Amino acid sequence: MAPYGYKLSVHVPDSLQQPAPGAYATLVQFDTTINKVLGSKKRPYVGINSCKTKKMAFAVDYKYTDGTSKSTTTTGTCS
């Protein structure tokens, strides 16, 4: 799984994918904010212990109901 750490799976409900019979919705943007709750403290789901390489790797895999899929990767800088 390197260079990635945690995996997050998000299921989009069927009623959002197909709001009416025969009509499929198109995903044009996916934004999310995720906080991990540990006891009474909120901590970020994505966090780092160190930044030796000055970059963090991210990947996304989309799997669609018609059997197709899309994937992308990127890096972000850290200091």
Image (spheres, rainbow, N blue to C red):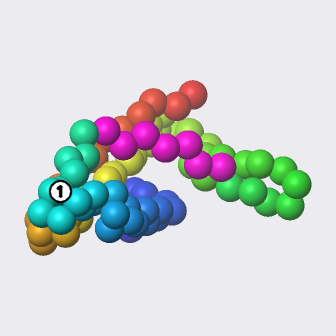
Residue 73 lies left or right of residue 54; in this view the side is left
The answer, for residue 36, to whether it is visible in the render is yes
Quarter of the figure with the C terminus:
top right
Q: Furthest residue to the right?
A: 40
- What secondary structure predominates along the stretch shown in magenta? loop
**Looking at the picture, how far across and down is residue 70, in whole percent?**
17, 56
**Looking at the picture, how far across and down is residue 49, in whole percent?**
65, 48
Specify the quadrant of the image occupied by residue 4. Answer: bottom left
**Of residues 75 and 68, the one drawn nearer to the viewer in this rendering:** 68
Q: Is residue 38 above or below residue 43?
A: below
**Looking at the picture, how far across and down is residue 75, in whole percent?**
36, 38
The answer, for residue 69, to whether it is visible in the render is no
Residue drawn where x is 68% and y is 55% of the image = 36
What secondary structure is marked by label 1?
Answer: loop
**Of residues 52 and 30, the one drawn nearer to the viewer in this rendering:** 30
Specify the quadrant of the image occupied by residue 23. Answer: bottom left
Q: How many callouts does the rendering have? A: 1
Q: Residues within 10 Å of mark 1 (few under 14, many from 20)?
A: some
Span shown in magenta? 29-35
Residue drawn where x is 17% and y is 56% of the image = 24
Q: Is residue 5 above or below residue 58?
A: below
Residue 11 lies left or right of residue 5; in this view the side is left
Residue 13 in magenta stretch: no
Quarter of the figure with the N terminus:
bottom left
Q: Is residue 6 above or below residue 34?
A: below
Residue 31 in magenta stretch: yes
Give the amino acid type for the residue marked by disc 1 in the picture: Tyr
Residue drawn where x is 43% and y is 40% of the image = 31
**Of residues 39 and 78, the one drawn nearer to the viewer in this rendering:** 39
Q: Name the residue beneath numbered marker 1.
A: 24
**Looking at the picture, how far across and down is residue 46, in whole percent?**
57, 48
